[in-house]
Every structure is written in structure tokens, then in C-alpha cells.
Image (cartoon, grey):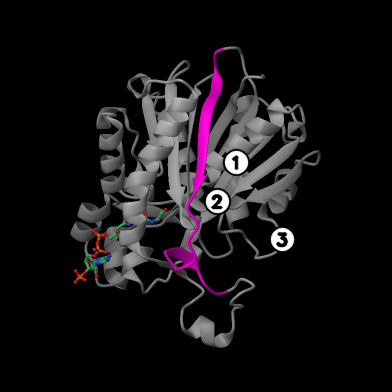
Amino acid sequence: MKNVGILGFGKYVPEKIMTNADWEKLVETSDEWITSRTGIKERRFVVEGQGTSDLGVEAGKAALKDAGMTPEDVELIILATCSPDYRVQNCSSLIQKKLGAVNAAAFDLEAACSGFIFSLVVGQAMIQAGMYKRILVIAAESISKLIDMQDRNTAILFGDGAAAAVLGEVEEGYGIISSYMGTEGVDDGTLRIKAGGTLYPATVERVLNREIYVEMNGTDVFKFAVKALPHATKEAAKKGNIDLKDIDILFPHQANLRIIDAAAKRLGIPMEKVFINLQKYGNTSAASVGIAMAEALEEGKLKKGDLIALTGFGAGLTYGSLIMRWSK
Ligand code: UT7
């Protein structure tokens, strides 16, 4: 089996900062409530005319630069997103065009906040199968365009951003060791956008009823997450014959500090080993784990040889984990 790992990594977040104080002006909330219930202080929002593809392109460029590659070197782009520029066509094709990755095929993978982990798993399998040598995995989201700005229960959680990884063969002893993907299918509004798909097309009435925005049962998602994150991480560790004590850094989906804290406790991983940056970016859905990894790299906290675990959960409900030895 080929050892598949990351040859280049990068992130991009839009410039516009949306603070808790900004939210206080829009809905009945407070910095104190948001901070104590979620840990989030601010998040980034795209501006008018900026789409998910624009974020993905910038993250992709950063990852390619880090890998010392050009867009022409990329053979396949896998984009993890649930907030594409258009309902139809795939957003990865827009990235392929804007990036000038003329030799690459491109497809989107929709697994909500678990999308980056799922995409890395798919990319790894395709390289191991001998189909491709260099795959650009991007996770990019502009959830700010999909939230109901009047719904304090949901809207204050989310932010926009992107991360990207160039996947390829790495030296023996490095790269992806094991992974686990899970799904607990629901169809009850636990976390979804109801209207705008084929079952409930976006009629004027549904738009006026605000059904084109994210709806969520926060309590149900919370309960799911505190079980799913440790379960996925334990399963991935078991498959890789890894002792969780040996994990150097855990990169959890940056949804809520209380969820992360509960998951880390269940895993017996001390919080000093858990990378957290949700205070700056909020929940950037599929992009959150990658943005956290990119920041750990920028801060010199993620180093060659580190054993790391990525773990996420999201709409669907999907969840997953991936363990790798950092190879750069
Ligand atoms: O990628 C996956 C995305 N989703 C998630 O990760 C969501 C997971 N769930 C959560 O993070 C938490 O459930 C929330 C942060 C969404 C909510 O926290 P909670 O501790 O579960 O609060 P709650 O929903 O039980 O609400 C407590 C109170 C309610 O008031 P009442 O009914 O007790 O009078 C809410 O109306 O807090 C109220 N509330 C707010 N108050 C001020 C809800 N949102 C806000 C707000 N500001 N933004």
C-alpha cells in the first residue's frame, strides 16, 4: 500500500470580521451568552460578490505554493462544501477554472462539516488505487450566506473560510494511518436547509417563511456530537492500532467549545493537546478542521512526525475521524 499524506497545506479566510458585538446589534443576544455557551468571539464573513469558490481558490493557491507545485500539476480537485456558489453546477469546477488547473477533473463532496475528513479519505483511496498521484482537497464554505440573520439560535455559530491540502505519496512511516466514517441518517430538520432542493423548491411562500436558511435543533446536534466525535476517533484509532495517549494533537471540528471539551474528556485526551481556534472563526463547517491545522502550522505547533487526529461531525448526520503522522 502506498503511504498517502499531505505535500502542501494552506488556508484562506475572508477579511470581514463579524464580532459578537456586531451580533448584539442585530438580534437579542450578548457577548457573554455567545462566549459562555460556545466559546466563539468573532467569525469571518464573505462580502457581497464573494463566493465559496473564491475562498477555495485562495486556499488552493496557498496549498500548491506550500507543495512547490503549479495548478497544472493537479490531476483532481475534490471540494468539500455544503455552501456551493450555485445549486447546480459543481463548485469545484469554478475553482478548477479560476485556479487554471487545466489538467484536473473536479467534483464536490457534500458531507457538511465532516466533508474535509471524508474528502481526504476518498483522495487517499484514489491515490492508493493508482488512479491519481496529486489530488487537491479543498474545504470551503460561506455559510454566512445561508443563515437566517434573524435567528439567534443558529446564526451566531457560523463563519466563512477555506483550507486546502495537496495529497500525494509520502515516505514510509508518514501520512494517513487510518480513518473512520459514519452516518446516522435523519430527515427531521435536525440540521438542514429545507427549501431550495427538489423536494421543497424555493417558492415565494417558502422564501417568505425563511425556509431557505439553515434550521437546526441545537440540543439534538449537541447530544449527537458529544457521542459521535469520541466514537469516530476511537474507531479510527482501533483500525490503526493506535493508543490515544500517543496522539500529539487533536483537531476537532470547531463547532462549540463545550462539545470539544466533552469529547476530549471521553477520549481521555487533555485539553493541552486539543487545538482550538473557534474563538476567532466560529463554525466554518467543512473548513474548520483544515483552518485549525493550517493555523497550527503557522504557529509552529504542528511539526514533522507529529501523530494527529482529525475529527468532525455535521448535518446528515455525518461524522468521521482520520489519524495521520504529519509528513512535512
Ligand atoms: O456543525 C454542526 C453545527 N451545529 C452545532 O454544533 C450545534 C450544537 N449545539 C450547540 O452548540 C448548542 O446547543 C447551542 C450553542 C446552539 C445552544 O446552546 P444551549 O446551551 O444548548 O442553549 P439552548 O438551546 O438550551 O438555549 C438556552 C436559552 C434559550 O432560552 P430559554 O428557552 O431557556 O428562555 C434560548 O432561547 O438560550 C436562548 N438562546 C440565546 N440567548 C441569547 C439561544 N440562542 C441565544 C443567543 N443569545 N444567541
Say if 224 sits above or below 218 in the image. Answer: above
Q: Which residues are magenta?
A: 173-195
Q: Callout 2 environment at 10 Å: few (<14), some (14 to 19), or many (20+)? A: many
Marks 2 and 3 in Cβ contact (< 8 Å) = no
Callouts 3 and 1 close, C-beta under 8 Å: no
What residue does disc 1 label?
119
Q: Is residue 177 within the magenta segment?
A: yes
Q: Amino acid at mark 3?
A: Gln
- Foreground tag (3 vs 1): 1
| Residue at the extreme bottom of the image, as rendered | 205
Instruction: Locate residue 59 relative to residue 125 in the image: left or right.
Output: left
Residue 251 placement (x, y as % from top left): 40, 35
Measured as percent of width and height from the top left, residue 90 is found at 69, 56
Using a 10 Å C-alpha cutoff, classify the residue at mark 3 as few (fewer than 14 neighbours), some (14 to 19) or many (20 or more).
Answer: few
| 74 is within the stretch colored magenta | no
- Mark 1 packing: few (<14 Cα in 10 Å), some, or many (20+)? many
Q: Would you say the residues marked 1 and 2 are in contact, meaning their CB atoms lie under 8 Å apart?
A: yes
User: Which of the marked residues, 3 or 1, is nearer the chain's N terminus?
Assistant: 3
**Residue at image location 18% in from the left, 58% down from the top:** 32
Disc on res. 111: 2
Q: On the image, numbered disc 3 is attached to which residue?
A: 89
State yes or no: Cβ of the residue under disc 3 lies below 8 Å from any atom of ligand 1.
Answer: no
Q: Residue at the spot x=47%, y=51% of the render?
A: 285
Cα separation between marks 3 and 1: 19 Å
Q: Position of residue 34 (x, y in %)?
A: 25, 58
The amino acid type of the residue labelled 2 equals Ala
Mark closest to the chain's N terminus, 2 or 3: 3
Residue drawn at point x = 53 percent, y = 87 percent: 205
Q: Is residue 4 left or right of residue 215?
A: right
Q: Amino acid at mark 1?
A: Ser
Instruction: Looking at the image, tell me whether mark 1 or mark 2 is earlier in sequence order.
Output: 2
**Visible in this render: residue 295?**
no
